[in-house]
Image: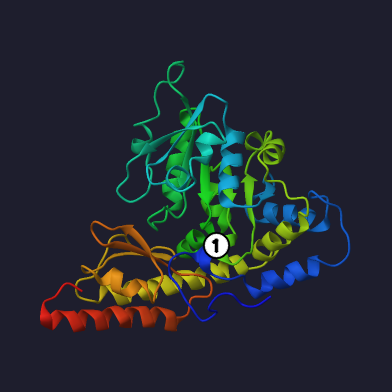
Amino acid sequence: MPVLHDPDRRTFASDNNAGVHPEVLSAIEQANLGHVSAYGADPYSTRLGEVIRAQFGEAAEVFPVFNGTGANVVALEALTNRWAAVICAQNAHIAADEGGAPERVGALKLLGVPTPDGKLTPELVDREAWGFGVEHRAQPQVVSVTQPTEVGTVYLPDELAALADHTHSLGMRLHVDGARISNAAASLGVALRAITTDVGIDSLSLGATKNGALLAEAVVTLNDGASSGTAFLRKSGMQLASKMRFVACQLLTMYGTDLWLRNAAHANAMAARLADALEALPGVALSHPAQANSVFAVLPDGAADRLRGRFGFYDWDREIGDTRFVCSWDTTSQDVDDLAQALKDLNETCAPQQEIC
């Protein structure tokens, strides 16, 4: 098949735009030999269970799925009744970027709470954690947080522990959307279980695709009460792979080695490099601290339009010029420096003329 894209083009729009890590491709190639049983009855899936328990604790169970939306919906369904509601940040991925799947497919009412930095706190949870036992109100049963948040901020272990304690005191459970949880752990310099199992998280949507996998996410339940019915919900939710070995081997390569950490640490380092470069430019202001692999910056008027053709990125808030740049496992220092230099050149060209760039 001919190459239909420009292999030299580099973008900052999303870590989903990056290719697949060579170690993952190699694992898929090796798993492709011969015949093995389907639907998870294969040695790669068995080994993955062992690896996940080593990473998250002996009570952990793993249910590989195709994508992050599927992981979130299945995880939340397993934690709730039919009449349930889920409390989340107003800009959480499950609320803003999944096409209504938790509500349409999972039949879950989402109760969004505005947050200044993407993070929920016990006090913010209490804004929607009421009406228990009142049949006229969807019953809050789960708090869901995104780690890192949609604006790139990272929950500290103590913040998650406080959320878990408060959530559990209300008879609710705590779920983590961890599509980029590797970036959070790398940023904090902690093990994965330090921001999940050890702080009282009940269920985790474990990401890999954004961090170098081809097509691999998973629901990881962290205690016995969180796993009830998950296997059945995965099947009825069309998230059970027949050739499971090809999903499992990707997760196994990622979390059975230090690949998750290597890739995430590199992406975070590139984001930190970019944040430093942008912050040093006149007229550019970071709108959120760059704590993982995303950089949010307000650019001078018109700058985004001039840069977009060469560097792909995401317009977060067009009204104020807020943009999002995401670094990936394969982002290079040169990629970062080229972007920063282009913006610097643009500023220098426009400034003497006092024009809108």
| Along the viewing direction, whichever of 155 and 37 lies nearer the viewer | 37
The residue at 40%/29% (across/down) is: 129
> Is 57 or 321 nearer to us in this picture?
321
Q: Secondary structure at mark 1?
A: helix
**Image quadrant of residue 23?**
bottom right
Question: Would residue 230 be found to the left or right of residue 328 on screen?
Answer: right
Q: Is residue 339 visible?
A: yes
Q: Which amino acid type is marked by label 1?
A: Lys
User: For mark 1, does the 10 Å Cα neighbourhood hold few (<14), some (14 to 19), or many (20 or more) residues?
Assistant: many
- Which quadrant: the C terminus? bottom left
Can residue 199 be seen here? The reply is: no
Q: Is residue 259 left or right of residue 154?
A: right
Q: Looking at the picture, tell me which residue is in the foreground, 138 or 62.
A: 138
Q: Residue at x 61, y 77 (%)?
A: 3
Image quarter of residue 255:
bottom right
Nearer-the-camera pick, 280 or 349: 349
- What residue would you read off at disc 1? 210
Q: Is residue 286 above or below residue 130?
A: below
Residue 1 location (% of width, % of height): 69, 75
Looking at the picture, how far across and down is residue 48, in whole percent? 73, 56
